[in-house]
Image (spheres, helix red, strand yellow):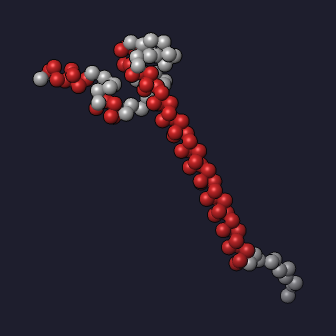
Amino acid sequence: SGAQTSHALPSANNIQSRMTQRYEDIELLYDEIIDEEEQFMLKLIKREKKLMKKLNNGENYDGSAGSDDDIEDADDDDDALLYDEDDFNNGSYSGEEEDLDDLQ
């Protein structure tokens, strides 16, 4: 019988503590990602509000005076907004509601 070299197996406690440490590291990373995502969303919302305000004031994206055509063209623009449904419903964005009333 040949001499067997015994490799020390990691203890159950050692494995448990390493797994716990990894789990905690992952949790921290996850929290960081969520925080970054929230910050990004807040930036987007802020930017969208600013652009909506400009559109409602009849300005172009560059701040020059705009026309109604510019608002229609916003859909084609790279900066096209995620329009808020309430803006449509309140009629602050377009006059479509009035047009529908004329048809009746």
The image position of residue 16, as x and y in percent, is 68, 73
The image position of residue 5, as x and y in percent, is 85, 79
**What is the count of numbered marks?**
0
Residue at the outermost left position: 104
Res. 15 image quadrant: bottom right
Name the residue nearer the viewer: 11 or 32.
Answer: 32
Name the residue nearer the viewer: 38 or 23.
Answer: 38
Residue at image location 33% in from the left, 34% down from the top: 85
**Quadrant occupied by the C terminus:** top left
User: Does the rendering let one see residue 12?
Assistant: yes
**Quadrant occupied by the N terminus:** bottom right
Residue at image location 14% in from the left, 21% down from the top: 103
Residue at image location 19% in from the left, 23% down from the top: 100
User: Does the rendering let one see residue 80?
Assistant: no
The image position of residue 46, as x and y in percent, is 50, 33
Residue at image location 66% in from the left, 68% down from the top: 20
Q: Is residue 60 left or right of residue 98?
A: right
User: Looking at the image, is 57 positioned above or below residue 19?
Assistant: above
User: Looking at the image, is 52 positioned above or below residue 34?
Assistant: above
The image position of residue 98, as x and y in percent, is 21, 22
Name the residue nearer the viewer: 41 or 19.
Answer: 41
Residue at the outermost bottom position: 1
User: Looking at the image, is 78 positioned above or below residue 28?
Assistant: above
User: Looking at the image, is 4 positioned above or below residue 27?
Assistant: below
Q: Is residue 17 left or right of residue 53?
A: right
